[in-house]
Image (cartoon, helix red, strand yellow):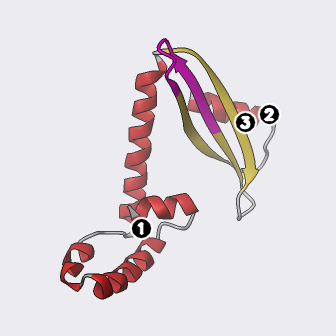
Amino acid sequence: MCHRLLHNVGNRFCDGEYVKKCSLKVVDYICPDKRNLFEAVSLSASTVTRRIEEMSDNLRSQLLNVKDKFECFSIALDESCDVSDTSQLLVFIHGIDKDFHIIEELAAIHSLKGTTTGHDVFEKLHETL
């Protein structure tokens, strides 16, 4: 679960080891007999990266499975700069099926290096779809 927290707050993947150290201190205080369970959790940069990639692949697969059931859909784009002044393009897909189940998903996040023209945005959108 820590990898989700790290991903959501936008910290670097290498912060996982720091979180693990902090968690172990808390475990030592709250339930020291369970320390070995927490020590077994890997939060290395490569493990956190792999877990995030697995979650992304899973969400993409789920979205691909439901997209054919959409009666109609819309796409929303949001572009803004992150803390390193790199433009980030977020692609959202909203769809509704015949039973009026609404699906709203973040389909992709793209870093736009250099320019952010309409052509650049369209290329990333086309890459997503």
Report the number of numbered marks. Answer: 3
Percent of width and height locating residue 38: 26, 74
Q: For the residue carrying disc 3, how many other residues have a C-alpha within 10 Å: few (<14), some (14-19), or many (20+)?
A: some
What's the residue type where badge 3 is placed?
Val
Q: CA distance from mark 1 to mark 3?
A: 30 Å
**Residue ID at (56%, 39%):** 106
Q: Quadrant of the N terminus?
A: bottom left
Check residue 45 in the rendering and tell me which mark sits there, or answer none.
Answer: 1
Q: In the rendered view, would you say 116 is above or below 8?
A: above
Q: Considering only vertical position in the picture, is 61 above or below 85?
A: above
Secondary element at tag 2: helix
Q: Quick one: label 1 or label 3, which is nearer the N terminus?
A: 1
- In which quadrant of the rendered image does the C terminus lie? top right
Principal SS element in the magenta part? strand
Asked if residue 107 lies left or right of residue 122, the reply is left
Tell me the kind of residue under disc 1. Ala
Q: Which mark is residue 118?
A: 2
Answer whether labels 2 and 3 touch (C-beta < 8 Å).
Answer: yes
Q: Which residue is at a point 40% across and 47% down the rendered structure image? A: 55
CB atoms of marks 2 and 1 within 8 Å: no
Q: Earlier in the sequence, mark 2 or mark 1?
A: 1
- Identify the disc placed on residue 121: 3
Looking at the rendering, the stretch of residues picked out in magenta corresponds to 91-102
Viewer-proximal residue, 51 or 94?
A: 94
Camera-nearest residue between 76 and 126? 76
Q: Position of residue 86 (x, y in %)?
A: 72, 56
Quadrant of the image occupied by residue 33? bottom left
Q: Quick one: SS at disc 1?
A: helix
